[in-house]
Amino acid sequence: MNAYDAERIGELLEAEGMVAEGIEGADVVVLNTCHIREKAAEKVYSDIGRLRARDGGAPRIVVAGCVAQAEGAEVLRRAPAVDVVVGPQAYHRLPELLKGHRMVDTDMPVVPKFDALPTRRRSVGTNAFLTVQEGCDKFCTFCVVPYTRGGEVSRPVGAVLAEARALADAGARELTLLGQNVNAYHGDEDGGGTLDLAGLIRRVAQVPGIARIRYTTSHPRDMTQALIDAHREVPQLMPYLHLPVQAGSDPLLRRMNRAHTRDSYMAQIADIQHQVPGIAISGDFIVGFPGETDADFDATLSLVREVGYAQAYSFKYSPRPGTPAATMAGQVPEDVKDARLAELQRVIGEGAIAFNRASVGKTCDVLFERAGRRPGQLIGKSPWLQSVFVSDASLKIGDIAQVELVDAQPNSLEGRLVTLAQAA
Ligand code: 5AD
Ligand code: SF4
């Protein structure tokens, strides 16, 4: 979502007559920041230090994003070189804020923000992000999102479809619908009534030029039968589901306030795998949550093995100021977190290789996104989000081709062109 926001900030400032020409000579630099873990949040202060010491003098520095939201005026106190602090829901006001000095704006007018952004999207690659929902009401005890992005807000259906058309005009063939809790989407329709995510996906599928649709991130509590039906019935919707579970032990899930159990999650996954055979499952995991015992951690490892993830993301628990878990007893030492993360990533990696190996011999559509390292080689994505490289002089970026998967590496697959399905 930060990548999406950064694109929109760029478009907004271009519409004001500013030109993006690289960081060296820039008069204004916008640092779009992340607050989800401490490491990401600290990065901004080292970036500010580097910019301040830039040859030829410091630019005006804007701190945008969730660090700006969480720390507000504190950023100005801690970093005197910063000129503007603007939260993730107020960046449409940047042109106005840049007229002043030492400005802070951490209001949260989500829908007016989107309304104020340029309607046209500048040229994008074959894949584009489209934010349809922001914020979260779930309050997992480790997470800052409900505080930094605010409560759940869905963009109206008409606005999403207009942007989907603008992205298709700008060259996108695949859209990833974004939301912190995207499967809780419920957007107003022009004529009254609301659409859920499944309904929205069916509408986006009708936008000319959009060949593929993905969405992320979903919460287990908000998976609906309608969304599973969409996976079976909408050919453009790719067979891939990112459904974070975070941990495999019930006492831990309870303290995380996840509102689901290991069994409820496993039953859900089994049901989805049964209804949508072959769907790729992905997830997020946290190791070293306060009070995590060896037995809790083993439960996470066994869950990973049972689900058979195509891929998954894993993180060391990072205490975030103001969240309940930050002050819980039983904070886990760093060396234990390191060891558990390494072990979990090894098991996740084994699963990913097994998933890739099981794909060898299949023929599937690949959307080609970029040039590969070798001459004449293109890299694209399978429906299951695997990177597939093919060497064939007749292919170009943006093509969708039927490809036979002939060999598996840990992070990619080699394919052989069968036939062109849809030219770019
Ligand atoms: N520490 C570590 N990981 C976190 N995540 C969210 N908050 C934290 C935290 N405090 C992870 C979760 C979430 C993903 C986006 O980031 O796994 O799903
Ligand atoms: Fe954070 Fe996701 Fe939990 Fe919301 S559902 S609080 S965004 S981890």
Image: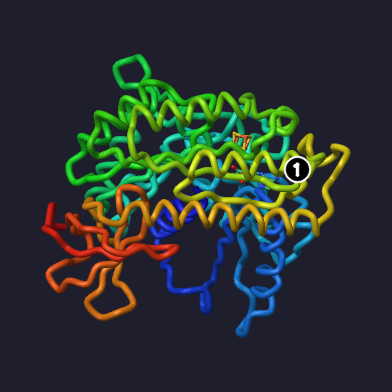
Please give left or right for residue 21 compared with residue 394 in the image: right
Dot 1 crowding, Cα within 10 Å, few <14, some 14–19, many 20+ = many
Which residue is rendered at x = 76% and y = 64% of the image? 80
At horizontal 62% and vertical 64% (from top left) the residue drawn is 61
* Amino acid type, callout 1: Phe
Nearer-the-camera pick, 161 or 182: 182
Depicted 381 relative to depicted 21: above or below: above
How many marks do you count on the picture? 1
Picture quarter with ligand 1: top right
Q: Is residue 397 above or below residue 359?
A: below
Q: Residue at x 66, y 60 (%)?
A: 83
Q: Is residue 273 above or below residue 403?
A: above
x and y, in percent, of residue 385 in the image = 37, 51
Query: 231 left or right of 6?
Result: left
Q: Secondary structure at mark 1?
A: loop
Q: Disc 1 designates what residue?
A: 289
Q: Residue at x 36, y 63 (%)?
A: 408
